Amino acid sequence: MCRAVRASLSFLVAAFAMMAVAVPAAHAVQASGSILLVPSKQTALVQNEVVSVEVYFRNTSTQTPGPGAGQPPIVETAATLTGPLTVDIGCVDCACTTKDPAALSFIPGPANGCDVQGTGVTGCVAGPNPGEVLINLAPAGILLPADDAPVFLATISLRNNLADLAPTVLRASTDICALTACIQPPSTGCASCAAEGCTFLAGEFAPPPLLRCKHSCLNQVNFTNNFDAYIFQGVAIVNDPNFDPSTVPFTLNMGRPNQAPVVSISVPGGIPAVGNGTWVLNGFANSNNPGIDQIKISRQTGANCQNSYRITVRFFGNFSALEGNTDELLRTTISFGALTFGNEEVWQRLQNGNLRNDIDIISAC
């Protein structure tokens, strides 16, 4: 009886041992990953301010085990990353089709050009093209474990060179086939691809843009013998289904960057609703009386435009500080409570001395 029990136990131990070593091999593998860019400060950067950016890599490569009861359909797998990584530091748009290489500068650090370098990183250098930083890796690359925990690569420093840094995209990318994951076990095939990641840096003036209407809507400053006229028309995109201009303060400021506003409007109680997605505040101003003539907010109703609001403002005051013989770089900001939109462009000086601007960015609504 005891011998039978011992025999049964021995069989079970042997069976479990076979299960432990007979792990089904993967029959498919995919390589994927992303680069994480983590700036120490992202917005409200002043001129000459230096920001550190930590660079990580997250491996999300997976393999699919062969058929077998109880096997998970997808499991994480290790991968190898080879360099260099290229960090574009002056992208004007997310596709980086346009760059402003003068916006940000790379500041070499004490660790082979990096401020801090991770295991397998050999250094950080300015790239061959303006507005590039290269993070170089050892020839064999970096072995990334079979999990998606971020792996630290390097910290680099960037300096903001502009008084008003518009939102500027940082885009990091690998070479085309820099990330490789192989079927395990055995290593009978590999998949390779690229990876990237993006963030942005912005100056003190970097709110969402004010857009031009679908059809032309000119902004104007008309100088008169009495009070001058200011007319603004533009579109703001508000991704908030509960947005209500009557419940939040309205402010508008317009003038030269880094100077006191020439036009300043404040409506602490918001713009009254008049129904049908329209808000209107009527005043008594004209060329003989300064102040608000009208502020009108209209929710656009076209297809895919329900989150777009057209803003029209007519205001009278003394704008002689804008008179002159040259075009003016002017900044307009509009706020609904804590929600702020902005535009900064050159306004054209007309022959009669008035100023005109048709905002560059066109709304579809």
Image (cartoon, grey):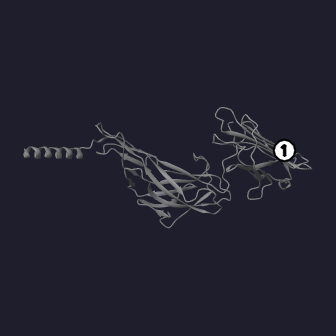
Residue 127 appearing in the image: no
Task: Please rate how many residues cluster around mark 1, counting C-alpha atoms within 10 Å: few if below 14, some from 14 to 19, many from 20.
Answer: some
Q: Residue furthest top?
A: 303
Q: Nearer the viewer, residue 292 or 354?
A: 292
Residue furthest bottom as drawn:
110
Task: Give the residue type that dot 1 points to.
Answer: Gly
Q: Position of residue 15 (x, y in %)?
A: 18, 43
Residue plotted at (43% across, 46% down): 177
Q: How many marks?
A: 1
User: Is residue 131 toward the left or the right of residue 328 in the image?
Assistant: left
Quadrant of the image containing the C terminus: top right
Which of the pair 365/311 is nearer the observer? Answer: 311
Residue 234 visible at all: yes
**Which part of the image, by quadrant, shows the N terminus?**
top left
Percent position (x, y) of residue 355?
Answer: 82, 48
Residue found 77% across the figure and 58% down from its top: 260
Q: Secondary structure at mark 1?
A: loop
Q: Position of residue 357 (x, y in %)?
A: 77, 45
x 48%, y 57%: residue = 135
User: What x and y, as percent, mark residue 30?
Assistant: 39, 42
Q: In the image, is 338 to the left or to the right of 26? A: right
Give the labeled residue for mark 1. Answer: 283
Q: Which residue appears farthest toward the front when viewing the image?
A: 1
**Direction from residue 52 to residue 276 in the image, left or right:** right
